Image (cartoon, rainbow, N blue to C red):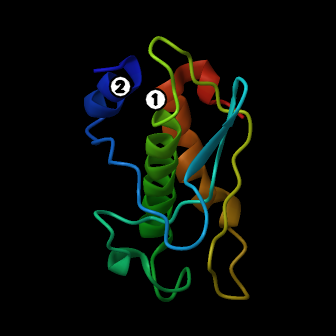
Amino acid sequence: MTEIQKKVQELGFALPSCPAPLAAYVPATRFGETIVVSGQLPSVNGDLSDFCGQVPTGISPEKAKNAAAICFLNNLAAAMTLLEQGETLRLVQMQGFVQSEKDFYEQPSILNGASELAVKILGEYGRH
């Protein structure tokens, strides 16, 4: 078990298997020392039904923040498929999209669900 997997487990999460692509893309690609991960949805075992709808009317901000954390775990799983034994993972950039009502302006707080989890798992290497 890697240090990342141990940390994920200590936090009460399970690192999922890399989600299967839903279209014509690869989940992660490596260029030298850089791993680029394709966008991931908040799927749990291939199921998105718990996280459908616009924030805040169709899905609560708290649940949407949890969805962002799940997206990060799915991205982490994709990156881990290309990480070499003993190699360190450092997050450089994270992008996210929030499906929200037109009068909702708290998208950064939703996406912070992913950012906070990244720091909890990767420490300073999770800051981006």
Badge 2 density bin: few <14, some 14–19, many ≥20, Cα 10 Å: some
From the viewer's side, name the closer residue of 94 and 26. Answer: 26
Which label belongs to residue 13? none
Circles 1 and 2, Cβ within 8 Å, touching? The answer is yes
Residue 126 x/y as whole percent: 60, 29
Q: Quarter-wise, where is residue 106 in the image?
A: bottom right
Residue 108 x/y as whole percent: 69, 58
Q: Secondary structure at mark 1?
A: helix
Horizontal arrangement in the rendering, residue 16 relative to residue 107 (left or right): left
From the viewer's side, name the closer residue of 5 and 58. Answer: 5
Residue 30 x/y as whole percent: 66, 36
Q: Secondary structure at mark 2?
A: helix
Amino acid type for the residue under numbered disc 1: Ile
Amino acid type for the residue under numbered disc 2: Lys
Badge 1 density bin: few <14, some 14–19, many ≥20, Cα 10 Å: many
Q: Which residue is mark 2?
A: 7
| Residue appearing at x 45%, y 80% in the figure | 59
Q: CA distance from mark 1 to mark 2?
A: 6 Å
Horizontal arrangement in the rendering, residue 12 relative to residue 48 (left or right): left
| Residue appearing at x 32%, y 63% in the figure | 44
| Residue appearing at x 34%, y 28% in the figure | 5
Q: Which residue is mark 1?
A: 121
| Residue appearing at x 42%, y 61% in the figure | 20
- 81 versus 45 height, above or below: above
* Residue found at the far top of this picture: 86
Q: Quarter-wise, where is residue 109 in the image?
A: bottom right
Q: Quadrant of the N terminus?
A: top left
